[in-house]
Image (cartoon, rainbow, N blue to C red):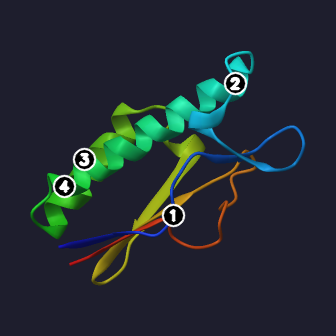
């Protein structure tokens, strides 16, 4: 399998309408800092599941298990499978895709 990470996660719109990166939040901005930690944690969990999968079936099982175990997964990410790939998209607070395209693409 080949994994392509197209964009980094944890981009959210800050109060001023600009993208903010979770690791750059100030200590006083605990609301956004918490979101950044969650998004980065889920992103690393996704990459771990991809790296532990040796087949499409195993990847499907691992991703569905991750989605089940992490109750807030659907708040930040969507994933799906095509005939020879898996895609991952980050979603915003409205449930829409943040970037419009995939942030991770796994070909198999």
- The CA distance from mark 4 to mark 2 is 32 Å
Residue where numbered disc 2 is placed? 26
Camera-nearest label, 1 or 2: 2
Residue 21 percent location from the top left of the image: 63, 43
- The CA distance from mark 4 to mark 1 is 18 Å
The residue drawn where x is 70% and y is 46% is 12
**Relative to 79, residue 32 above or below:** above
The reply to whether the C-beta atoms of the residues labelled 3 and 4 are less than 8 Å apart is: yes
Residue where numbered disc 3 is placed? 48
Residue where numbered disc 4 is placed? 51
**In front: 8, or 63?**
8
Camera-nearest label, 3 or 1: 1
Residue at disc 2, secondary structure: loop
Image quarter where the N terminus lies is bottom left
Residue 37 percent location from the top left of the image: 52, 30
**Relative to 71, residue 4 above or below:** below
Camera-nearest label, 4 or 2: 2
Residue at disc 3, secondary structure: helix
Label 3 vs 2, first from the N-terminus: 2
Label 4 vs 1, first from the N-terminus: 1
Residue 91 picture quarter: bottom right
Residue where numbered disc 1 is placed? 7
């Amino acid at each position: 399998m080949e994994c392509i990470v197209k964009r980094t996660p944890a981009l959210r719109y800050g109060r001023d309408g600009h993208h903010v990166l979770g690791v750059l939040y100030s200590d006083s901005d605990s609301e956004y800092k918490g979101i950044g930690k969650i998004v980065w944690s889920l992103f690393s969990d996704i990459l771990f599941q991809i790296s532990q999968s040796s087949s499409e079936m195993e990847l499907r099982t691992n991703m569905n298990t991750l989605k089940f175990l992490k109750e807030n997964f659907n708040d930040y990410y969507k994933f799906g499978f095509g005939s020879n790939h898996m895609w991952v998209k980050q979603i915003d607070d409205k449930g829409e895709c943040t970037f419009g395209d995939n942030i991770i693409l796994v070909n198999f």
